């Protein structure tokens, strides 16, 4: 059963008042439990709630006067009533799922509100792709608000995207009903240096009275940081240290602490609250990027809350960081994020505030999950054929496309190498002494080849470099058309023939991820929608994703959630070293750098 589009508070105030006063019957009453009040940070045993028109009408010690012959009564004895959980910053595409299937995956985990930035599809399909994500989001039985992507490309001049987003696109999107603000402003050098385009996008958002998302990935807390904050971003999720969180909130930003599939940044920053005693209302929990395997098997925002508690955070504070803090940040504290009169009736029943088992979920007053099982329908958008034909290589690839020519006459070279850092977004800028055979530089030991294959305009371009940290052995290659943020094709391999096989396979199926070894395909995750998402059920996609992870491990990889690390190797706005269609990118300098170290 789906909830109908919810009426505004103003449009149903008369009925809410009548129910609260006992003159009309509620649609739903939940009684017998202990209410978690995130407004006052209290546990209120015996408090009851009455729901009408998808909103809380009465919240208090006794809702018996709200009950009529048709009122559904839910007995919550032995359970806590907590607000539905909110994800303050995330990318639906990272789940390999469409908004409908993402909602279906996270609802049983207690997520009832999502603030998503579809900048992945924006890089492939432009404003049209954003609109499709926005429209499917509005069909769902939970609240999915869209942040208009700000940076496609994320770093102008350092990458080429399928489409570009500009101020006119932002101004247009601000008029759409589900747009809540501007997505993470990743082009922080542009803001710092007064880029007219970036500042116009921010201005268009501010004129609409909406929130500007932040992304400051530099460790520099000097003048550059202060210039970025002055530009208007009001939150940031790129912190990895306690000092990162403290510096942000001191400047009036909300510090977003993330726990995604591969980002474990809560533990290192939560001490700003638990040890330094900073005001927790300026902190928000988010996931940023979660793939389908994590969603199905481990959870979503309930996982982040549990983790924060395990790291020493008071359970009520952790819940505030995943509910009312998030709603307040986006100007929606009178609409959601707490169990209080007039708010959307998004509520979870759980028997334990630390382990947080999600026993029942209500969204807008309708039960949408019970005992980990989805009880609602999540409608799909009718995705057109053209979004399933976005992988354009120009011609089939061969092993020669992945050969790296050595400088003339060299027997060995010193090459720059992208160093993967487990469980973090940043990489390290490394070097390696590599052998030359027949004029070609060869990967060796833990140094594998990485290639970026242009897939938007069919130019046939291939950029080759080196990466370490995956631990691959044997003759293998992993290719993916999920390659944040430009989403060309990224291939990591130890053998050029396998790299060609993997590239051609993804061109054949319209995108996704595939792993090859010794001429055999070991795993495949088809993602035909923009080469980023599947429209298959979450559990089916999760099974394929888990098979991919297992195949990566079988090829020697021991990293946690290594596919997520793979997909970020082209993210040219997070230090230190990345790859793009322009070449190897030194993100500390925001400049193209040579593959080989001069003079070595």
Image (cartoon, rainbow, N blue to C red):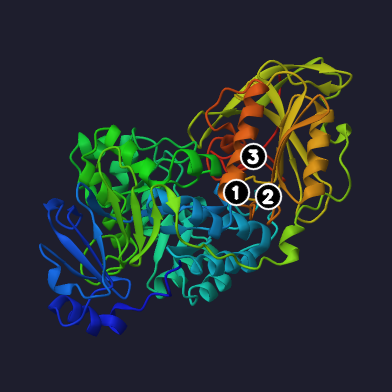
Q: In the rendering, at what x and y percent does residue 521 appear? A: 77, 32
Q: Which quadrant of the rendered structure holds the C terminus?
A: top right
What residue is pinned by disc 2? 527
- Choose the circle earlier in sequence order: 2 or 1: 1
Decide: few, some or many residues near mark 1? Use Cα within 10 Å; few <14, some 14-19, many ≥20: many
Q: Which quadrant of the rendered structure holds the N terminus?
A: bottom left
Q: Which of 74 and 252 is in front in this view?
A: 74
Decide: few, some or many residues near mark 3? Use Cα within 10 Å; few <14, some 14-19, many ≥20: some
Q: Could you say whether the residue bearing mark 2 is in a helix, strand or loop? A: loop
Q: Can residue 514 be seen in this view?
A: yes
Mark pair 2, 1: CA separation: 7 Å
Q: Which of 492 and 462 is in front in this view?
A: 492
Q: Could you say whether the residue bearing mark 3 is in a helix, strand or loop? A: helix
Query: What residue is at 56 percent from the left and 40 percent from the top?
Result: 589
Residue 563 position (above or below residue 103):
above
Q: In the rendering, at what x and y percent does residue 268 appear? A: 34, 33
The quarter of the displayed image where residue 197 is located: bottom right
Query: What residue is at 51 percent from the left and 65 percent from the top?
Result: 137
**Numbered marks: total:** 3
**Left or right, residue 369 beside residue 66:** right
What residue is pinned by disc 3? 544
Foreground: disc 2 or disc 3:
3
The quarter of the displayed image where residue 467 is located: top right
Residue 224 position (above or below residue 264):
below
Residue 318 position (above or below residue 10):
above
Q: Is residue 243 visible?
A: no
- Choose the circle earlier in sequence order: 1 or 3: 1
What residue is pinned by disc 1? 96
Q: In the rendering, at what x and y percent does residue 368 appear? A: 41, 59
Q: Could you say whether the residue bearing mark 1 is in a helix, strand or loop? A: loop
Say if mark 2 contacts mark 1, CB within 8 Å. Answer: yes
Q: Residue 573 carries which label?
A: none
């Amino acid at each position: 059963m789906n909830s109908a589009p919810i009426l505004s508070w103003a449009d149903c105030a008369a009925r809410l008042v009548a129910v609260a006063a006992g003159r009309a019957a509620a649609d739903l009453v939940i009684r017998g439990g202990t209410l978690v009040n995130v407004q006052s940070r209290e546990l209120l045993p015996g408090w009851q709630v009455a729901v009408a028109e998808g909103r809380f009408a009465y919240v208090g010690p006794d809702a018996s006067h709200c009950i009529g012959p048709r009122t559904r009564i839910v007995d919550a004895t032995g359970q806590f009533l907590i607000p539905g959980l909110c994800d303050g910053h995330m990318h639906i595409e990272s789940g390999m799922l469409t908004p409908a299937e993402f909602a279906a995956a996270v609802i049983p985990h207690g997520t009832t509100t999502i603030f998503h930035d579809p900048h992945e599809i924006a890089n492939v399909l432009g404003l049209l792709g954003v609109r499709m994500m926005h429209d499917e989001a509005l069909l769902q039985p939970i609240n999915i608000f869209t942040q208009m992507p700000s940076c496609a490309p994320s770093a102008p001049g350092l990458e080429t995207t399928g489409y570009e987003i500009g101020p006119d696109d932002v101004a247009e999107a601000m008029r759409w009903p589900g747009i809540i603000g501007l997505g993470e402003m990743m082009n922080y050098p542009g803001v710092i240096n007064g880029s007219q385009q970036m500042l116009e996008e921010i201005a268009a958002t501010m004129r609409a009275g909406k929130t500007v998302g932040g992304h400051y990935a530099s460790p520099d807390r000097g003048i550059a940081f202060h210039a970025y904050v002055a530009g208007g971003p009001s939150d940031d999720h790129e912190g990895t240290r306690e000092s990162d969180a403290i510096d942000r909130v001191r400047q009036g930003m909300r510090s977003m602490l993330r726990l995604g599939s591969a980002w474990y940044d809560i533990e290192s920053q939560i001490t700003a609250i638990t040890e330094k005693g900073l005001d927790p209302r300026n902190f928000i929990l988010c996931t940023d990027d979660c793939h389908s395997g994590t969603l199905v098997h481990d959870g979503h925002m309930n996982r982040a809350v549990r983790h924060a508690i395990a790291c020493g955070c008071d359970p009520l504070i952790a819940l505030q960081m995943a509910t009312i803090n998030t709603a307040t940040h986006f100007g929606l504290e009178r609409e959601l994020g707490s169990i209080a009169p007039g708010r959307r009736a998004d509520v979870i029943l759980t028997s334990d505030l630390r382990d947080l088992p999600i026993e029942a979920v209500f969204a807008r007053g309708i039960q949408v999950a019970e005992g980990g099982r989805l009880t609602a329908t999540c409608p799909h958008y009718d995705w057109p054929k053209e979004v399933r034909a976005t992988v354009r290589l120009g011609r089939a690839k061969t092993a020669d496309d992945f050969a790296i020519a050595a400088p003339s006459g060299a027997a060995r070279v010193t090459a720059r190498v992208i160093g993967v850092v487990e469980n973090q977004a940043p990489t390290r800028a490394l070097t390696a002494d590599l052998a030359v055979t027949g004029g070609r530089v060869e990967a060796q030991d833990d140094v594998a080849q990485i290639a970026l294959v242009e897939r938007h305009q069919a130019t046939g371009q291939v950029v080759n470099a080196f990466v370490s940290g995956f631990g691959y052995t044997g003759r293998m290659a992993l290719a993916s058309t999920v390659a944040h943020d430009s989403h060309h094709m990224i291939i990591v391999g130890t053998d050029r023939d396998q790299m060609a096989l993997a590239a051609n396979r993804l061109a054949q199926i319209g995108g996704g991820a595939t792993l090859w070894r010794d001429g055999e395909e070991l795993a495949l995750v088809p993602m035909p929608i923009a080469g980023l998402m599947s429209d298959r059920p979450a559990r089916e996609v999760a099974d394929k994703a888990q098979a991919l992870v297992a195949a990566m491990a079988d090829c020697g990889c021991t990293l946690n959630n290594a596919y997520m690390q793979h997909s970020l190797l082209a993210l040219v706005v997070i230090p230190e070293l990345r790859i793009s269609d322009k070449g190897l990118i030194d993100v500390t300098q925001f400049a193209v750098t040579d593959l080989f170290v001069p003079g070595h």
